[in-house]
Amino acid sequence: MTLLDFLNFYLVPGIVLGAIYAVGAIGITLVFGILRFAHFAHGDMTTLGAFVALALVGTGMNPWAALPLAMIITAAIAIGVDRTFYDYLAKRPKIVTVMASLGVALMLRSVVQVVWGVDPTTYASGIVRPNDYFGILLRPRELYTLGAVALIVVGLELFLRRSKWGKAMRAMSDNPDLARLSGVDNRKVTMLTWAIVGALCAAAGFMLGINTEVHSMMGWHLLLPMFAAAILGGVGRVQGAVLGGLVVGVAEELSVFILPAQYKAATAFALLLLILLVRPRGLLNGKVL
Amino acid sequence: MDLIGLANYAVFIAILIGIYALLALGLNIQWGFTGLFNAGIAGFFAIGAYTSAILTSLPADHRLGGFELPLLVGWAASMLMAAAIAWPIGKICLRFRSDYLAIATIGVAEIIRLVIRTEGWLTGGVRGVTGVPRPFGDLPYMQSQLAYLALVVVLVLAAYLLVERQLRAPWGRMMRAIRDNENAAAAMGKRVAERRLQAFVFGSALMGLAGALFVHFNRSITPEAIDPMIATFLIWIMLILGGSGNNRGAILGAALIWIIWSVSELLTDRLPTEIAIQAKYVRVFIIGLTLQLVLRFRPEGILPERQYGTSLPRK
């Protein structure tokens, strides 16, 4: 196998997949870090976001133009889910909210299955041939995916570091009591967090859908790699989630060298157990709950 | 449906209630007494089912098995296997908050599903394992069903009495202490991580036994027999609705939810085909919603946890 073959058939698909995991993992790490619970409905919220985009594409919109709109709609749905199902559990032990989120996962998925059915579908049909960039083969949609992920990550980092509300979010992640004493409005930060998380879910679901296909279980299968990525990078660390996502994506593609291809999905799990065993704080020193 | 058919159906449902009651008891040890979040119940169930099936079934040339070992060996092995899978997972994850255990158990269930589908030489792949012997299987249909029901009832009763005894014993008091205030329990010299591991392994073994009972009742198992997420979730809602921390509540919840679940299946199957498929997902939605409602309006369940040896209300 030549170096170019390795790049084209293993590394590039791994990076594209990893970039998608990264977007999902950022959402998980934000909920885990700021609201302090493992959000199990994250995968199925991703599915819902992908199907919202599908509905928009169905009205004749260009898929990439539909993405921002789908992100806004899913952000609103995420805020609604929090208000309806998580908010009133705030005073109870956090693990009860984890359980509620498992129920929400099932509910979101059955909504998708009732409304859109269970058959896989795509945003755009037809075969797209990859373009050659100095020997590296990339399809336009892969290029757009990497560009969109870069845009999202840089934008989010700037927001968290520079803006007032971003700083409030980080303050709540670091020390909620101190944040409250300093005048940070918990309710508003919670709402803002869910809006960002919902938008990220839609982006991850859409990009997975446009690179593979759209179906009702897609998000559930994302859950394990996304959690592995978030914990691998360090809970609460956005850059960690990106790093973790890329590691998990590339590791999954490379796993075919040592494991039968059916066990690709097991790679994320192996990485998760490994990091919990040797360095539970994650690569970039996140939180341990 | 005539009367005989109805009686047959009732016995069938009752046997499955018994199997689910075992699963709910297992979860009660983990969640109700110890506060451990196991989201991979279906995985431990499947491990138990396949272990016993492979050890006791008739020989078949496309897969391993056909050892035709006695039933009790199969059951013991199914409990041991489930415990053996639970041990390393618990060992790694129980040092942290239960969220991590939940993620890891979801992963375990997925991996088990992958292995069952992929490793045809071991599990028969999609064809599954058939020719699993059934105790009292030679009797006429109705007697055989009733005899199996009696067997399941005896096992559930045994499990109930054992767990109840443990709960009243100092062990149960220690477990509740760990659940309610981990730091205080640790300060009193209780080995928190070790005790949690114990509860996790015991509970998982009970789930493995339930799997074995299921496979001998069905005489066969295929990867499609259990939908991992829905099975796991049904057991959670059984325990939460019945009353977590209360063994009778776990059994009551299993009976209630399983009756509602099966009767609603009977009803939706009669709908025209176009709606029937959607109705299937609506049922799942309603189960998810039920959990939210119970968590919101009656978090202690129908039969709340009893207080032992104290008149002080728990906070």
Image (spheres, coloured by chain):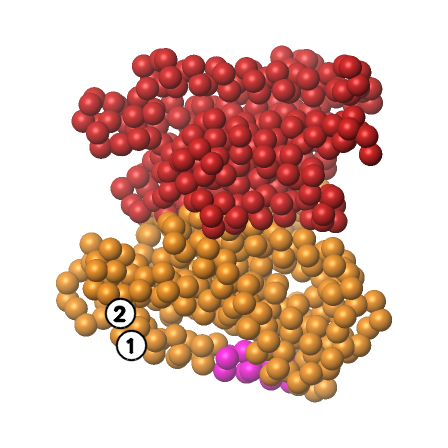
Chain colours: A red, B orange
**Vertical placement of B276 versus B175: above or below?**
above
Residue at 84 percent across and 71 percent down: it is B61
Q: Is residue B130 visible?
A: yes
Q: Quadrant of the N terminus of chain B?
A: bottom right
Residue pointed to by mark 1: B169
Q: Chain of mark 1?
A: B
Q: Quadrant of residue A70?
A: top right
In x, y percent, where is residue B80?
55, 73
In x, y percent, where is residue B264?
57, 55
**Vertical placement of B123 versus A50: above or below?**
below
Mark linked to residue B8: none
Q: Quadrant of residue B221?
A: bottom right
Foreground residue among B202 and B150: B202
Q: Is residue A46 magenta?
A: no
In x, y percent, where is residue B152?
54, 78
Mark 2 burial class by Cα count in 10 Å: few <14, some 14-19, many 20+: some
**Vertical placement of B310 versus A235: above or below?**
below
Q: Magenta residues?
A: B143-155
Instruction: Report the side of A227 relative to B5 (left or right).
Output: left
Residue pointed to by mark 2: B173
Q: Quadrant of the C terminus of chain B?
A: bottom left
Q: Amino acid at mark 1?
A: Ala
